[in-house]
């Protein structure tokens, strides 16, 4: 398939000289001869190659002067098949718009295009007789003797349109003083075979919830030749609610202990079920008083119990039973109240403990639950292809301030970007692996994507 530029106008038939003896040749004849060879060669260039950089033309900052660039010798072909040849390194001063945000560039494209100019203008000449004076040459006057092809380096803020003959060789980032901060070579377009595309044709589609710590990297491969088009479609959607409504089963552990902080006053323990053991944390005593039935019989000291026989405590007058420290009272009951049965100094019980996490235990903040508002819709989605941020190129073409504003009413959500032709954004989409990274700096949301390689 021939490039579209072949059919932009009507060309004259190809003619060349038919030489014979005694033929008289004039300037028009020689120009016709040149025109034949030039046109055939340019048709051949357009038939075999796409337009772009063929060799060299590397752009660097001039050492010691960040306001100027150096362009190395090299060769490019424009969309008319003309050879743009820079024979020697050339210096050019920068012209453009400073970047207000580091890494973000608007325009500032350095281009090269074909140009030629007449030189060696001849204003007079002599007529020299030939053939013994029978024929005289016409004098040379009023015309240049040479046409010099010398390319032009120019600056533009717009990507060159098809047919204007300019080839982008660099894009520069400038600071507030118009010094070069960075020379971006990712915008360079290189020549490739102009044969019908044999690239593997395929399409990819998918979706991904993205936030500042979770971007989407879409790897795709070009095989079988350079594709005609690589088209990306993007659309925003709401962040998946699954992240907030689903939680795996887990437990929280609690470790408790009690500590005696002081004395104990009269108190009771309420019993509810079963066999209960009441533990006293502080030391205390029990006093047993003897019941003397016969005040005259000092040997008959007894302790009366309604259910037990009297116990003779005669030998143990004044006996008291005291605990020696911490001990327990076991009470078998289904319900009711147990009296502590004695008095002790006031004290309290302190409880200390902690709850254990039930999920992944990690010191890395990226794996811990966060606080704040939930993710909703994309806000300022960034599109980076093979390391080159194309977001501004895309938003400029769409007339948007940014890709998403965090709401459901932004055009990214309601209608999407439509087709984004990556091959027209200065990328080198040759054979091999390529990667598209979709990321956001704040908030989060869902991005839907379609990619067509044709």
Image: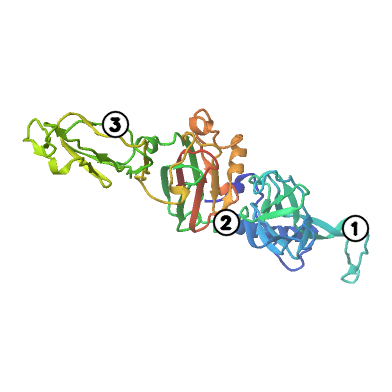
Of the numbered discs 2 and 1, the one sitting upstream in the chain is 2
Q: Is residue 175 left or right of residue 365?
A: right
Which residue in the rendered view is the most extreme toward the bottom? 132
| Residue located at (71% from left, 65% from top) | 19
Image x and y of residue 208, in percent = 43, 42
In the image: residue 54, left or right of residue 90: left
Q: Residue 453: tell me if it is visible.
A: no
The residue located at (45%, 58%) in the rendering is 224
Classify mark 2: residues with Cα within 10 Å, few (<14), some (14-19) or many (20+). some
Q: Which residue is mark 1?
A: 141
Dot 2 lies on which element?
helix
Residue 91 position by quadrant? bottom right
Please give left or right for residue 127 compared with residue 146 in the image: right
Closer mark to the observer between disc 2 and disc 1: 2
Closer to the chain start, of discs 2 and 3, is 2
Q: Going 51% across and 27% down the picture, which residue do you hit?
A: 409
Q: CA distance from mark 2 to mark 1?
A: 39 Å
Find disc 2 in the rendering and name its residue: 47
Gap in angstroms between the C-alphas marked 2 and 3: 105 Å
Residue nearest the observer in this picture, 444 or 256 = 256
Residue designated by label 3 = 267
Give percent across and percent down for residue 177. 78, 49
Q: Secondary structure at mark 1?
A: loop
| Closer to the camera in the image, 88 or 258 | 258
Quarter holding residue 191:
bottom right
């Amino acid at each position: 398939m021939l490039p579209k530029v072949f059919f932009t106008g009507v060309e004259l038939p190809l003619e060349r000289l038919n030489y014979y003896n005694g033929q008289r040749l004039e300037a028009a004849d020689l120009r016709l001869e040149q025109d034949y060879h030039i046109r055939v060669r340019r048709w051949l260039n357009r038939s075999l190659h796409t337009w772009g950089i063929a060799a060299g033309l590397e752009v660097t900052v001039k050492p010691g002067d960040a306001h100027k660039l150096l362009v190395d010798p090299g060769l490019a072909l424009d969309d008319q098949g003309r050879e743009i040849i820079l024979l020697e390194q050339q210096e050019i001063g920068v012209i453009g718009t400073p970047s207000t945000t580091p890494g973000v560039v608007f325009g500032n494209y350095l281009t090269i295009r074909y140009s030629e100019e007449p030189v060696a203008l001849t204003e007079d000449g002599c007529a020299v007789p030939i053939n013994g004076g029978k024929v005289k040459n016409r004098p040379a006057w009023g015309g240049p003797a040479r046409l010099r092809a010398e390319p032009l380096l120019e600056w533009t803020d717009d990507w060159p349109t098809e047919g204007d003959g300019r080839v982008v060789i660099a894009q520069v980032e400038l600071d507030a003083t118009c010094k070069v901060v960075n020379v971006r070579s990712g915008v360079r377009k290189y020549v490739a075979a102009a044969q019908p595309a044999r690239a593997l044709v395929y399409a990819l589609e998918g979706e991904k919830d993205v936030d500042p710590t979770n971007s989407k990297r879409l790897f795709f491969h070009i095989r079988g030749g350079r594709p005609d088009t690589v088209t990306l479609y993007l659309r925003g959607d709401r962040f998946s609610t699954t992240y907030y409504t689903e939680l795996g089963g887990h437990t929280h552990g609690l470790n408790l202990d009690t500590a005696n902080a002081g004395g104990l006053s009269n108190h009771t323990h309420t019993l509810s079920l079963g066999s209960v053991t009441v533990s006293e944390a502080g030391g205390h005593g029990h006093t047993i008083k003897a019941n003397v039935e016969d005040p005259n019989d000092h040997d008959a000291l007894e302790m009366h119990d309604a259910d037990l026989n009297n116990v003779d405590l005669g030998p143990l007058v004044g006996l008291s039973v005291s605990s020696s420290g911490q001990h327990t009272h076991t009470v078998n009951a289904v319900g009711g109240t147990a009296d502590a049965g004695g008095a002790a100094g006031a004290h309290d019980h302190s409880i200390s403990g902690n709850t254990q996490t039930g999920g992944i235990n990690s010191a890395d903040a990226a794996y811990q639950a966060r606080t704040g508002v939930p993710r909703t819709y994309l806000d300022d989605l960034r599109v980076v292809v093979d390391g080159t941020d194309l977001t501004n190129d895309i938003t400029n073409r769409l007339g948007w301030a940014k890709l998403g504003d965090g709401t459901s009413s932004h055009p990214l959500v309601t209608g999407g970007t439509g087709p984004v032709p990556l091959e027209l954004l200065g990328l080198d989409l040759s054979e091999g692996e390529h990667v598209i990274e979709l990321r956001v700096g704040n908030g989060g949301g869902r991005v839907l994507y379609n990619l067509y390689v044709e």
